[in-house]
Amino acid sequence: MATYDVVYFAWVRERIGLPREEVESTAQNVSDLISELSEREPRYAAAFSDLSAIRVALDQDLAQFDAPLEGVHEVALFPPMTGG
């Protein structure tokens, strides 16, 4: 089991109600971690109900949902960034 510092931004933070938390997980990749979080409570399930609206960064580098978590310390979850 590994421990990750999971950071939430924008409306993801609002739906979950936390800016960050320490999460112990057996997840092998980002998708597994999100599945574990979604099973915790309805607020997590609501935040992650549409993964097309979520982006992820591992140790501040953009990553895909199938990215492995081995050696990762921080997982950031946020909506797509827009410019303008």
Image (cartoon, rainbow, N blue to C red):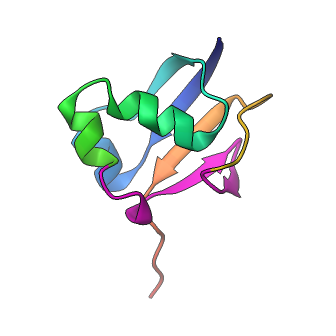
Could you say where residue 28 lies in the image, as x and y percent from the top left? 67, 31
Residue 5 position (above or below residue 55): above
- In this rendered view, identify the residue nearer to me: 34 or 59: 34
Q: Is residue 76 magenta?
A: no
Residue found 51% across the figure and 19% down from its top = 22
Number of callouts: 0
Residue 80 in view of the camera: yes
Query: Magenta segment, which residues?
Result: 49-65
* 34, 23: nearer the viewer: 34
Observer able to see residue 16:
no
Q: Report the residue at 44% width, 36% height from top.
A: 35
The answer to whether 78 appears left or right of 44 in the picture is: right
Query: Whole-percent x and y of residue 32?
Result: 54, 35
Q: Classify the position of the N terminus by image quarter.
A: top right
Q: What residue occupies the far right of the structure in this picture? A: 71
Q: Is residue 74 shown left or right of residue 77?
A: right
Residue 3, position in %: x, y?
62, 16
> 39 or 23: which is nearer to us?
39
The reply to whether the magenta stretch includes residue 54 is yes
What residue is at 66 percent from the left and 49 percent from the top?
A: 66
Q: In this view, does 37 lie above or below 8?
A: above
Q: In this view, does 5 lie above or below 47?
A: above
Expressed as whole percent of the image width and height from the top left, the position of residue 45 reads 27, 39
Classify residue 59 by image quadrant.
top right
Location of the C terminus by quadrant is: bottom left
Residue at the farthest bottom position: 84
Residue at image coords 64%, 34%? 74
Q: Residue furthest left?
A: 42
Q: Is residue 13 above or below residue 20?
A: below
